[in-house]
């Protein structure tokens, strides 16, 4: 089999595009599709300083590699967040991120949950469990991680934050929001959605049209070493998302390109809606405790709500 672009030996078949590519052309294909998406939605301006959430997982490695090709590396900052989970310290991944950022001329910062909220993820989860609150580790992790990224972006003067969500993640979230009837979250998922508070730094997801398998393949061809240790809290992952994920992967096999078409249709419909009513943006209130933005109709932000529930702070 020959590469459809250059004639070298083909290594990858890309079902949603119906093409066979060699390693090199596959990587170029991914970079050019990210670039196209970034420009299509004006995700980056040359003057932007971007804080990237870089966990050390494969998707975050791809984000680091591709963004440092598309943007001035001296205007990129990689932030690694240490959750603090016994038996899951990921020193190898941290060392790998240190090396990968240095090679690309990108500044690297490490922050722990403990630094940011005074407690590690395990300590938060244990307090929640003691009170039988039924809050999953993934809930704590997601909310606090988002808070840390936004907070540090503001402190460091970054104009954007970038996360490594891939097409599979975005397609799952889209369906979950539709199933829940959560239209405000649905619209906020769109890359052109206005930022609802001065304290929130605009979030971009450059890999949102790259399949998870493509990110994994790209990472592999770029020298990324896959770790065998999984987060021990993975068993508590929300089951709805896990089910949707399995179902979509199955559908994708039968009909290549469904996830891509789903997200493209969403983009088109919501773009029209967003562009047709410019100016009427919902503004978020500030949390009574920490002054960070809250969800609509709430007095306290989600981080403070969680910390109150487990008794770490008082209302
Ligand atoms: Zn080729
Ligand atoms: Zn708060």
Image (spheres, grey):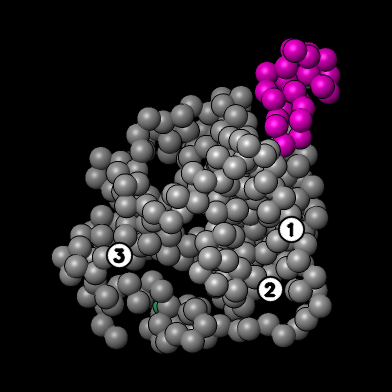
Label 2 or label 3, whichever comes before in sequence order: 3
* Residue 89 on image: x %, y %: 32, 41
The numbered mark at residue 194 is 2
Q: Earlier in the sequence, mark 3 or mark 1?
A: 3
Distance from disc 2 to disc 3, alpha carbons, whole Å, reads: 30 Å
Task: Give the foreground label among 2 and 1.
Answer: 1
The residue indicated by pointer 1 is 265
Residue 48, position as x, y percentages in the image:
71, 59
| Residue 280 visible in the shown view | yes
What's the mark number on residue 135?
3
Q: In which quarter of the image is residue 307?
A: bottom left
Q: How crowded is mark 3: few (under 14 residues within 10 Å), some or many (20 or more)?
A: some
Q: Label 3: state its secondary structure.
A: loop
Residue 88 versus residue 10 in the image, above or below: below
- Give the camera-side residue of 155 and 118: 118
Q: Is mark 2 on a helix, strand or loop?
A: loop
Which numbered disc, 2 or 3, marks the residue closer to the eye? 3
Q: Residue at x 45, y 85 (%)?
A: 298
Nearest the eye: 179 or 192: 179
Is residue 81 rendered to the left or right of residue 25? left
Q: Which mark is residue 315?
A: none
The boundaries of the magenta stretch are 1-28
Q: What element carries label 1?
A: helix
Eyeballing the image, is 57 above or below 191?
A: above
Residue drawn at point x = 35 percent, y = 62 percent: 140
Q: Earlier in the sequence, mark 2 or mark 1?
A: 2
Q: Residue farthest to the front?
A: 254
């Amino acid at each position: 089999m020959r590469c459809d672009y250059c004639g070298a030996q083909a290594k990858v078949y890309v079902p949603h595009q119906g093409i066979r590519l060699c390693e090199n052309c596959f990587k170029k294909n991914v970079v050019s599709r990210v670039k196209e998406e970034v420009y299509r939605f004006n995700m980056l301006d040359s003057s932007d300083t971007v804080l990237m959430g870089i966990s050390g997982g494969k998707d975050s490695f791809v984000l680091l590699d591709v963004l440092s090709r598309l943007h001035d590396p001296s205007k990129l900052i990689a932030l690694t967040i240490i959750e603090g989970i016994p038996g899951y310290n990921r020193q190898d991944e941290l060392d790998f991120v240190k090396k990968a950022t240095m090679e690309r001329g990108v500044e690297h910062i490490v922050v722990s949950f403990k630094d940011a909220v005074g407690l590690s993820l395990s300590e938060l989860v244990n307090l929640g469990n003691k009170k039988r609150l039924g809050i999953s580790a993934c809930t704590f992790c997601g909310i606090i991680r988002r808070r840390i990224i936004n907070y540090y972006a503001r402190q460091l003067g970054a104009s954007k934050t970038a996360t490594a969500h891939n097409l599979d993640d975005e397609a799952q979230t889209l369906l979950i929001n539709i199933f829940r009837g959560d239209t405000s979250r649905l619209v906020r998922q769109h890359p052109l959605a206005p930022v609802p508070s001065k304290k929130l730094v605009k979030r971009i997801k450059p890999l949102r049209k790259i399949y998870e398998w493509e990110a994994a393949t790209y990472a592999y061809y770029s020298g990324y070493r896959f770790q065998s240790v999984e987060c021990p809290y993975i068993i508590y992952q929300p089951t709805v998302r896990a089910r949707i994920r399995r179902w979509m992967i199955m559908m994708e096999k039968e009909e290549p390109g469904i996830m891509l078409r789903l997200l493209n249709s969403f983009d088109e419909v919501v773009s029209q809606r967003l562009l047709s009513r410019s100016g009427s943006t919902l503004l978020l209130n500030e949390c009574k405790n920490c002054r960070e933005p809250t969800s609509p109709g709430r007095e306290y932000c989600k981080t403070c709500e969680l910390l109150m529930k487990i008794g770490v702070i008082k209302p």
